[in-house]
């Protein structure tokens, strides 16, 4: 296997139009069926972790869901290593949410959880969610949080109700302090808080970073330096497919000019250790 891509959205459901326009992706170039999607990953010899979250900005078409991505992972084990499950942070009451988290964590295909605080409208370090984090910490499965800028709601009046502040890395610092055994994956380089993210991840050993949302050569310089150095054991290769293409991402990753052992860690070994993959 060449790599594990820890940050993948199915191109078949929950695709945000603003996002693929922002990334200048041609929707016709994206796989249209589950089978084409799986062959693309299997053909690259890369295994993906599929995210079960559906963006609040997408109202048309079938919804992306945990069940949907679990089905994909079950049917295409050669392409998908498992899923990062999502939880409803709005409507449902806390007890239901915790029961759902427990049920999901017992599924061996659920390798972790993924949250998008700005889109889901919550602060990760809000005390009212601590019982949920206790549950997830006890499950031993890593929890990924979107950080920084989001294309969702970008360039619209009021940002479609989305607050970037909820995606600031500093909130994960509080969470990592209060849940030291929880493995927290900060998704994306956290721009415009790249330094904040690097400060937080350098200080808290239970915080990991992923490279998603960018071609590697376009990652902020400071972030590139960090994953080459101090954070090389805690950096994970991710694309944010379909917004960033897997083939282009792999070509770009080679341009980072990393030592072979560091490359191997970021593409494979770190994800294997963090998410307990085979
Ligand atoms: Zn994403």
Image (cartoon, rainbow, N blue to C red):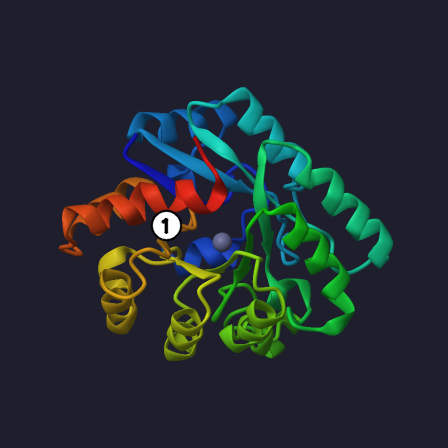
Q: Nearer the viewer, residue 21 or 104?
A: 104
Taking 137 as reference, is 267 left or right? Answer: left
Q: Is residue 114 above or below residue 63?
A: below
Question: Badge 1: few (under 14), some or many (20 or more) residues near its Cα, within 10 Å?
Answer: many
Residue drawn at (28%, 66%) of the image: 230
Q: Position of residue 116 (x, y in %)?
A: 59, 60
Residue drawn at (67%, 50%) of the image: 138
Taking 245 as reference, is 77 left or right? Answer: right
Count of residue discs: 1
Instruction: Return the residue at label 1.
Output: 244
Q: Position of residue 220 (x, y in %)?
A: 28, 70
- Please say whether residue 26 is visible from this viewpoint: no
Q: Is disc 1 placed on a helix, strand or loop? A: loop
Taking 174 as reference, is 120 left or right? Answer: right
Q: Position of residue 251 (x, y in %)?
A: 20, 45
- Please say whether residue 220 is visible from this viewpoint: yes
Q: Quadrant of the N terminus?
A: top left
Taking 48 as reference, is 66 left or right? Answer: right
Q: Quadrant of the C terminus?
A: top left
Q: Is residue 82 above or below residue 227?
A: above
Q: Is mark 1 within 8 Å of ligand 1?
A: no
Q: Position of residue 256 (x, y in %)?
A: 18, 56
Residue drawn at (70%, 51%) of the image: 87
Residue 199 quadrant: bottom left
Residue drawn at (86%, 54%) of the image: 95
Residue 182 quadrant: bottom right
Q: Nearer the viewer, residue 82 or 261?
A: 261
């Amino acid at each position: 296997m060449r790599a594990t891509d820890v940050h993948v959205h199915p191109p078949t459901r929950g695709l945000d139009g603003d996002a693929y326009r922002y990334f200048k992706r041609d929707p016709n170039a994206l796989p249209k069926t589950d089978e084409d999607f799986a062959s693309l990953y299997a053909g690259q010899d890369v295994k993906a972790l599929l995210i079960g979250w559906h963006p609040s900005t997408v109202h048309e078409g079938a919804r992306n869901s945990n069940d949907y991505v679990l089905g994909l992972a079950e049917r295409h084990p050669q392409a998908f290593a498992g899923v990062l499950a999502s939880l409803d942070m709005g409507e449902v009451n806390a007890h239901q949410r915790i029961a759902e988290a427990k049920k999901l964590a017992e599924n061996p295909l659920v390798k972790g959880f993924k949250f998008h605080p700005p889109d889901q409208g919550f602060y990760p370090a809000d005390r009212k969610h601590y019982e949920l984090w206790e549950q997830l910490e006890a499950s031993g499965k890593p929890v990924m949080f979107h950080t920084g800028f989001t294309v969702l709601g970008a360039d619209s009046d009021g940002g479609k109700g989305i607050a970037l502040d909820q995606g600031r890395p500093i909130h994960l610092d509080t969470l990592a302090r209060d849940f030291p055994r929880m493995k927290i994956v900060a998704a994306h380089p956290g721009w415009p808080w790249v330094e904040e993210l690097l400060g937080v991840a350098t200080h808290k050993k239970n915080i990991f970073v992923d490279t998603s949302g960018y071609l590697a050569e376009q990652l902020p310089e400071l972030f590139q330096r960090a994953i080459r150095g101090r954070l090389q054991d805690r950096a994970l290769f991710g694309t944010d497919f379909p917004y960033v293409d897997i083939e282009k991402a792999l070509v770009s990753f080679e341009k980072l000019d990393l030592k072979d052992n560091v490359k191997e860690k970021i593409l494979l070994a770190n994800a294997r250790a963090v998410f307990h993959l085979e």
